[in-house]
Image (cartoon, helix red, strand yellow):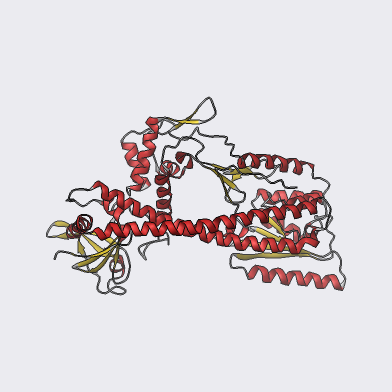
Amino acid sequence: MSATIRTASNVKVIPAKTQAELKNTKYKQLRVAAYCRVSTDNEEQQNSYNVQIDYYTNLINSNPDWTMAGIFADEGISGTQTKNRKEFNKMIRKCQQKKIDLVLCKSISRFARNTVDCLEYIRQLRQLGIGVMFEKENINTLVMNSEFIVSLYGSFAQAESESISKNVSWGIEKSFKEGKVKYVMHQTLGYRMGDDGKPYIIEEEAEIVRRVYRMFLDGLSMERIAEVMQAHGAARRSGSTTWNRSNVNYILKNEKYVGDAILQKSYTLDCITHKRVKNNGEKNKYILHDCHPAIIDRDTYNRTQQELAKRNAIKKRSDKAVTEQGRYASKYALSDIMICGECGTPYRRVVWNSHGKKLPVWRCINRIDHGTKYCKCSPSINEEKLHQTIISAMNDVYMQNTAFLQRMGENISVVMNDEDKNGVEKLKIEKRLAEIDKARDDLIHLVTSGSVEEDSLDKEFETLNDEEGYLKTQLESIEGQAVKRDEVRYSIISAVEELGQYQMHKEEYDDIAVRKVIECIRVLSKTEIQIIFKGGFEVNAAVAK
């Protein structure tokens, strides 16, 4: 029986991903094979054998995320011994050669009836990262946290060790839900562990962490931040003053700096091998908020995570790039926000030689790569004149245009109202999901206690699973909208903060200021650009000839 565990008020559950979600995180199709078996040679069983082959052929080929890795079928063979099953052994060899990612099978009895063989091959394939999906029992052997696994081991005599493991896992997860944190901070810059088992801040190191966050939000790339920190001799937790991109990335993504702790980032794969692996969504994670002193305020941390996501989503700017993934251009702010008004392609900085002097200009990448084939009229703009136009427009908006601040205030109000409405709906969905989880636990208890046969509850399980899937989709949509709202809010807040720093007339062009207050610059002609500020305020500005 699965007991209901109360979750502490400051603990948030990050739900485990579904199998479909886990597949979507991969960059290639899953190589899926199917295993079929019938025990006798009579005509009726032969028909079943052919039906199974046709069924799995159609199932695998109809799934766009799967590619066929083979149909392995033994006919007229007993399932009590695997040594006589040639197709089964052939499939196992392909698995060992890493040519299969997932095996489909109608039921446990089709896979093996011998306890030792069944468990041995399941464990062997799990160690290779290969799952076996039993359709009848609704079991995926890679997702061992499911209570459905009890029905698998309950059908075998050798269940004792698995039962012990399950109890231990339940106890660990119970401590997570209660908000009990076992800190591992020996690599975390800015913290040391106190005698009370809680981390405390080392202010000198904490200032290094804060500086990393400030530079990142000011537009510097991780590589550039590493160069700056190394040039200044800043020491990492290990004492080394050598910095690289991964050191900066670790700091920017570490939730410990905002006072939180994410629990169950890794887990033990099974009780047989005791192998510990990273939790990529196979099991629930738990966020414990405000459980120790924070070095970074929550607003700054959230803005940083938004900026990380934004930079990671950048696509390639040039058709001549080798990959589809682009790269964040921290050197020049305009590289990320300036686009061609004719074809929508970003602009790039190039340097011309004019009468022996270097002249920086900005040109449409489409024109650079393809001439006038796709973009016929986009102009090249002198960088100095472009900078002067941007500075002038910023001064005009900040110093004279009250509509700018009014628009920002209105947009923040709209974002907050939408957040309140979606928050109520989110609570309703989360409450219903908890009820579904409880109902499923009750049904599983009936099965494992022997009160009813599992087959008799198939319809109830199916109904609960369908409703759960629908509600999770709705919840994902709400959370996606929340991410977009946060991005809008943080960009507006950043612009307002930058505005507050410049009370006097701004004289010099500043990449950092431009990143913070301007969303996009669209080149309309050689003498006119459109500037879209954070918050949606737009102005057209003349570029000097």
The residue shown at (47%, 60%) is 481
Determine which quarter of the picture holds residue 514. bottom left
**In the image: residue 432, left or right of residue 272:** left
Let me know if residue 475 appears in the view. Answer: yes
**In the image: residue 165, left or right of residue 282:** right
Residue 266 image offset from top left, x and y in percent: 59, 43
Residue 176 image offset from top left, x and y in percent: 61, 41
The residue shown at (32%, 74%) is 374
Residue 85 image offset from top left, x and y in percent: 79, 59
Front-lying residue, 242 or 271 = 271
Determine which quarter of the picture holds residue 377. bottom left
Residue 102 image offset from top left, x and y in percent: 66, 58
Front-lying residue, 280 or 406 = 406
Extreme residue toward the left, this view: 355
Determine which quarter of the picture holds residue 137. bottom right
Extreme residue toward the top, this view: 195
For the C terminus, give its image quadrant.
bottom left
Q: Is residue 180 above or below residue 410?
A: above
Let me know if residue 26 appears in the view. Answer: no
**In the image: residue 320, left or right of residue 521:** right
The residue shown at (37%, 46%) is 222
